[in-house]
Amino acid sequence: MSASDLAITDLNDDLRPLVEGVLDGEQLSLSRLISRIENGAPGYQDAVKTLHDHTTGTRTIGITGQPGSGKSTLVDKLVDRLREQDLTVGVIAVDPSSPYSGGSVLGDRVRQTSRNEDPNVFFRSMSARGHVGGLAAATFDVVHAMDAFGKDVILIETVGAGQNEVEIVRAADTVCVVAIPGAGDDVQANKAGILEIADVFAVNKADLDGATATAQELQQMIRIGQDLERSDTDDPVDDPDTWVPRVELTAAIKDEGVENLVDAFDAHYAFIKESGELAETRARRFEQEVRTHMGNELDQLADAVAEARRDLLAADADVDPYTASEELVVPFRRAVEEYIDDG
Ligand SMILES: Nc1nc2c(ncn2[C@@H]2O[C@H](COP(=O)(O)OP(=O)(O)OP(=O)(O)O)[C@@H](O)[C@H]2O)c(=O)[nH]1
Ligand SMILES: [Mg+2]
């Protein structure tokens, strides 16, 4: 498939200057373009298309964990460490409970203000509201925008509740689950889910009692999980193809342990690059995005078809709902069959 022929000069008067600004490294343009993406402004998809040629596949790190575990505090300290390495950083805080967007959440406004002096850090919070194409799609459009802007690393913070958020965080290259001391029971409760998505655990609030015990519990669960997976192989222990999730103790509020966490992220990233898993993750994310966009477009087509055949949608129509649906789908089916035959 060929790349989009769309040029930046083809964009509408609202979006063209924003895309140009983003490519020139103007933060305000980035901020405004993200608002257009969030609000589903006319033509925003075209804007995202034109960014594609300017993206490099920026590294993404997902930070998730229960409410109040210290994710935002940790992200703040992670940004400091990454800045020390001279990396430019984008932060997306996905806040499903908030009706506000664009950094209007109190904590984020404070954070943004305190970072104003550093043009190499860009914070953005996104609420779950709106998003014509869905929250996950909007989040990845924002990742593309930050990538094209030139960010080296993008941190994505989510509370990790709900399908939407799991979908978002799973699509990151590295997933960090933030646990807290005494969270053993909670962790046990959704052990499978957490073990499955975490590449690195941060046991945060390690200044509180019980952090070491929680870390040990997690280590044990990881070992058990790996043993189960390996039970059918001969020489399981040193399997170089398997990443063993790392567990790091952090006290974000005291800025302790954050370096080790960055080190764990780097080790994971190096591992997945080497093993080919990174390419797989990226392919999966790409497919997920394409399917989401396809689904949205098909929904619109379905609306149009249904609208044209209102007669089939009435409760007093002669047909049952299955039959009505089958009739409405006929044009799609025909088109898909032709498409596949041509392919
Ligand atoms: N004792 C202690 N408290 C911490 C630590 N890190 C964060 N906190 C506190 O925990 C509370 C929640 O911190 P946040 O960073 O907002 O947590 P969060 O996970 O982002 O919260 P949500 O986004 O609401 O889910 C705040 O009062 C922090 O000061 C830590 O290392 N030790
Ligand atoms: Mg937070």
Image (cartoon, helix red, strand yellow):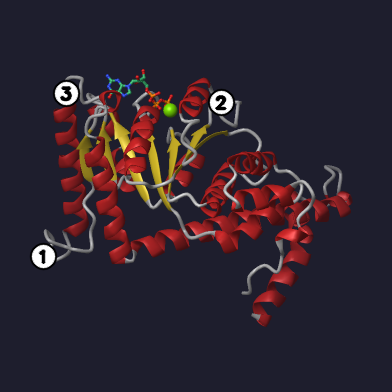
Instruction: Write down the residue under mark 3.
Output: 210
Give the residue displayed 86% in from the left and 43% down from the top.
316
**Contact, CB < 8 Å: mark 3 with mark 2?**
no
Give the residue displayed 27% in from the left and 39% down from the top.
201
Residue 257 placed where, x, y %? Answer: 22, 34
| Image quarter hosting the N terminus | bottom right
Instruction: Write down the residue under mark 2.
Output: 98
- State the image quarter where residue 251 is shown: top left
| Gap in angstroms between the C-alphas marked 3 and 2 | 31 Å
- State the image quarter where residue 302 is shown: bottom right
Q: Residues within 10 Å of mark 2 (few under 14, many from 20)?
A: some
| Gap in angstroms between the C-alphas marked 1 and 3 | 34 Å
On whether ligand 1 comes within 8 Å of the CB at mark 2, the answer is no
Q: Residues within 10 Å of mark 3 (few under 14, many from 20)?
A: some
Instruction: Write down the residue under mark 1.
Output: 235
Give the residue displayed 43% in from the left and 51% down from the top.
152
Mark 2 secondary-structure assignment: loop
Q: Nearer the viewer, residue 343 or 319?
A: 343
* Visible residue check, residue 260: yes
